[in-house]
Amino acid sequence: MSDGRLTVVIAGNVYLSADGVRLFLEGSGYDVAALVSTPAELRAAVAARRPDAVIVGDELAGDDEVAALRGLSPDTRIVVVTSRAAPAPEAPDRADAYVSRGAPLAAITAALATLLVDLPLSIVATAPGSAELAAVPRPGPGRLRVLQFVAAAALAFGLGGLVLVFSGGTREIGGPRALPGTGTPGTVFPGSPTPGSTLPAASALQDARTSLSRLVQAIQASRFDLAVSEARTMISDRQQAERGGLSMGDFDAEVLSSLQPVVALLPADMLPMFRSILGGLLPPVGAQIQIVGGGTFGQVQVGSSSGVRNLVIGNAGDQDLQFSGIQIAGASASQFSQSSDCAQSALPPGGSCTVEISFTPTAPGEKVATLVVQAQDVAASASLPLAGTGVVVPPPDTEPPVILCGQPGPGWTGADLVITCTAQDGGSGLEAAGDASFSLATHVPAGTEDGNAFTGTRTVCDRDGNCAQAGPIGGIKVDKRAPQVSCEKPDRSWQADNATVTCRSQDHGSGLASEASFALVTTVPRDVENADAQTGSRPVCDAVDNCVTAGPIGGFKIDRRAPKVTCDHSDAAWHRDDVQVGCSAEDAGSGVQPRSDASFTLSTNVPAGTADGNAATDTQRVCDAVGNCVTAGPIRGFRIDKAAPWIALSGLANGATYLLNQSVSVGAPVTCSDEGSGVATCSVPNTVDTSAVGVFSFTATATDEVGNTATTSVSYSVTYGVQLRFDTTEETRKIELRLVDANGTNVSSSSIVVTALDIDGETSLGRRFTYSKNDQEYSFAVPGKVDSGPHVLHLTASDDPVTHAVSFVYP
């Protein structure tokens, strides 16, 4: 007990959740010392804590376990939660109390109270139909609080109140409470609404019908814990509907008709539980007979009696049971006898009586019979097999057993030799059944050989103590030592190929089974280097299969892989010049040789003026110190553009002549193209500049994506238009004209000098025209030495590249 509370250990499968049992017990005033799940954990907890009680599932409550727990802590009370019937009172594995799995949790606290609270009182359940639970001795200080929690738990889980009967009077703790909304005492179940809460009556009735359906399904599926929960929920919802003013007659009839087909599926030990919850809503199941106890008697000396064994006959049904007969039937019925107090009066539901059975064999051999219990007026019966064996003790024996053993062969054996021996005794028989056939063996230490080994010995006795010895048997050749192997040491320098090692072996026992000299070879694959290469291995055995493994031998430096070369990859960009690619070489074996080859470059070599969209670098051969070589390159995919773009001017003629201020468009489109990286810019003026006279160039420029540039030009002339101020068909001695642009605008100016060059290309003149500022025109008097008739005057103007011709008729 800790801090005045009773200490409890919970073990194994108790209810649906061991943790839920722990919370309930702690709320009831107990100290739960441990939750365990295996026999070893249970024994350790009991030995360490010496608890007041252990609550254990029946899977951990076998004969050995109960005995072990009592040995560890004799004062600890054992409560078993079980779905089976409790053993007979005198059974060696019987616990202090049993609680049916699925019973209310308050049943556990009630059982603990009967076992642990030492107060001179009786605990009586006040719920209808319940029976007196226990009578216990006087309590120590502070333990009455546990009973108060027991009473509270009993109310919460449907057991009703508890009445404590003292020597000086009766004291009630708890008790039935009036149901909310009524003045009628009743039982409060888990999940019932608290006073003041509301639940529509129709909804509560519907919930009750849902719980009824789930209750039937749970019973059909043998899920009785769930069935108990659904039964409680159904009753709680029914009470809510009834408090809401609904009549329950039709629903109660529905419950009886629904449960009638499945009530026979309920285990006998759970019927009281369902009856306490459902009351009159559980259909009757009639009388059921239950026999508790064993009918096996083992071996009994012929003519002697086994003694009395008690069997408990119980009424597991819900009707009184009157026995019509209890008898032993079968071929060996006369070998068994029985007496009982069961036929004296009717046995009420839950009641029991005792049948005493004894076995008295009259002849050797196995005897079997059956105990048959038959009820009166009902079709209820039960039976239990009975079995026992009659034995006869033979007369005393004075001769030792006879032992026969095999003999070893002349050759070597690779393991301890096992010689089979047999023993027999014609008198009392061998004391140990295992002595009828056994073995003697040599015990030569591992790793040695012995040419004259001996077996051990064995003493064989009969049941009267007469003994004989088998062994030792000698002259046995046992060889447990494997051959000895020695191999050459590895060469520590790097090698370009696999290495071979010579090994030699010898054996001092049964001799070698294979050749004394052999070779081991490393197996480094091609294109691999290994600084610690291992040879293969080989078993070396002697004639009796003692073997040792030669190898693997390590430490060889084998380099069968060429250096690894890593170079930069080609990119997708175009380059104006050749590309240098950086490369590095490494060798994890003998190393790159020469060392200068550890870093180098490869380069493309595209001719000037050309472009290559898949240019490749040159190559370089790289080797390691033992002659493994690799060629680096060529690396392809580089885009090298050393060619300028190409420009086509198809809309302008070279040497064309235009008038001043003439509007001249480029005409046909200018084409720029590039065979490599592509045209980046194509610069061409939209129009031809004719704003001044003279000789000019029209230039187009193209640039590709890597900066290669091309320029194309055509030359052209801009000239004045000549507007004559006289009639060329009439005779004249004076040439008058104006200089105009393409639009006919007079551009004549004193700053522009017009010069007469010649007449008809023969008469050289070289004279200037006279400019009239008022008329804004030029005039020239033809010299008198010109012949009469038509002529052509050639003239030029300042900066004008064109020589103009004027026709006139001289008088």
Image (spheres, helix red, strand yellow):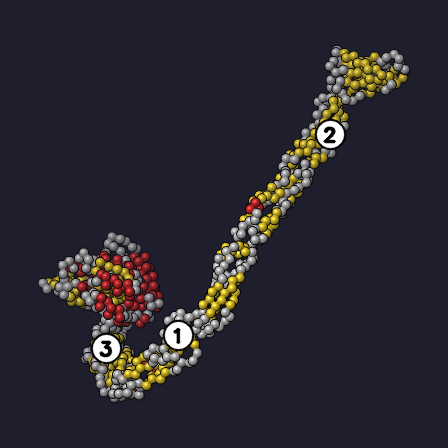
Residue flagged by tag 2: what amino acid is it? Val
Q: At 34% across and 64% down in the image, what residue appears?
A: 213
Numbered label tally: 3
Residue 100 in view, yes or no: no
Callout 2–callout 1 Cβ contact below 8 Å: no
Closer to us: 687 or 371: 687
- Element assignment for label 1: strand
Callout 3–callout 1 Cβ contact below 8 Å: no
Q: Gap between marks 2 and 1, in whole Å?
A: 117 Å
- Mark 3 or 1, nearer chain start: 3
Query: Which residue sits furthest left?
Result: 168
> Residue 415 at x, y = what percent?
41, 74
Closer to us: 489 or 751: 489
Q: Quadrant of residue 238?
A: bottom left
Q: At 65% across and 36% down in the image, what residue appears?
A: 704
> Residue 745 at x, y = what percent?
73, 19
> Residue 168 at x, y = what percent?
9, 63
Q: Quadrant of residue 191?
A: bottom left
In the rendered image of this protein, does residue 712 appear above or below residue 62?
A: above
Q: Is residue 792 left or right of residue 321?
A: right
Tell me the quadrant of the picture where the N terminus can be found.
bottom left
Closer to us: 603 or 318: 603
Q: Nearer the viewer, mark 3 or mark 1?
A: 1
Q: Which residue is mark 3?
A: 311
Q: Which residue is mark 1?
A: 450
Q: Gap between marks 2 and 3, in whole Å?
A: 134 Å
- Mark 2 or 1, nearer chain start: 1
Q: Which residue is mark 2?
A: 714
> Residue 773 at x, y = what percent?
74, 11
Residue flagged by tag 1: what amino acid is it? Asp
